[in-house]
Image: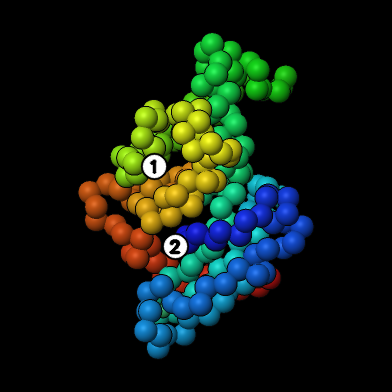
Amino acid sequence: MQLRYPSGHTSEAYVTHQAWRSASLPGCPLHPKGGCDFARHGSYARVDPPGTRIARWYCPQGHCTFSLLPDHLAARFPGTLGEIEAVVAEVERARSVEAAANALRPDDVTLATALRWIRRRVRLVHAVLRIVLSLLPDLCIGSTPTVCSVRARLACEPVLTALRHFACCHLQVLPRPLGFLPPGGDHGGRRTHFQQRRGPAPPQGTR
Ligand SMILES: [Zn+2]
């Protein structure tokens, strides 16, 4: 289960200061009255951005791992929210998705590959912004579900990182890359975040 870590760091500072080491989770989210063997469980590495690690905890009674995801990182998606937002904003400002793809793609990436890569990000971000607008109508009043519109409304950038704060009460029901809802977790309402449990204990040997 992912939880928010409002570390306040940029991506670079998070790695430089190894800020996962100072992340704290005072009690077990499954057992607020205590009584379980909830404990820190090292950290795990994210491939992107390089050098990034995520602090985690484990409750053996609940068979549940808890990860503290810093606000700048995309959830269940590679990279940072700022990187994803920049791509989507470029598309929103471009004449067409194809024009944005040609502007963004390196020479060794085909247009078809770049389009797939871009459309996936646009689809995910616009979908989660539509939900944010419905959950926080007062905050987003007058906005359309686009990065550029919500940026203008909230006067901040990257606005997806800011939305981790503004939508903090809803992160468990918001999809990636902003929220922590597991893919497929919104189908039929049968799975909740507390049912995202793992059977065996996570692998050891972490830092
Ligand atoms: Zn527990």
- From the image, tell me which residue sits under label 1: 139
Residue at image coords 52%, 17%: 97
Residue 132 in sight: no
Q: Which residue in the rendered view is the most extreme toward the right?
A: 16
Task: Answer few, some or many: residues within 10 Å of disc 2's Cα (few below 14, many 20 plus, some between 14 and 19).
Answer: many
The percent coordinates of residue 177 (x first, y second) are 49, 44
Q: In this view, does 142 lie above or below 202?
A: above
Q: Is mark 2 on a helix, strand or loop?
A: loop
Find residue 81 and report its image quarter: top right
**Under 8 Å from ligand 1: the CB of mark 1?**
no
Closer to the camera, 60 or 27? 27
Residue 34 in sight: yes
Tag shown at residue 1: 2
Residue at image coords 39%, 42%: 139
Q: Which amino acid does label 1 sit on?
A: Leu
Q: In which quarter of the image is the N terminus?
A: bottom left
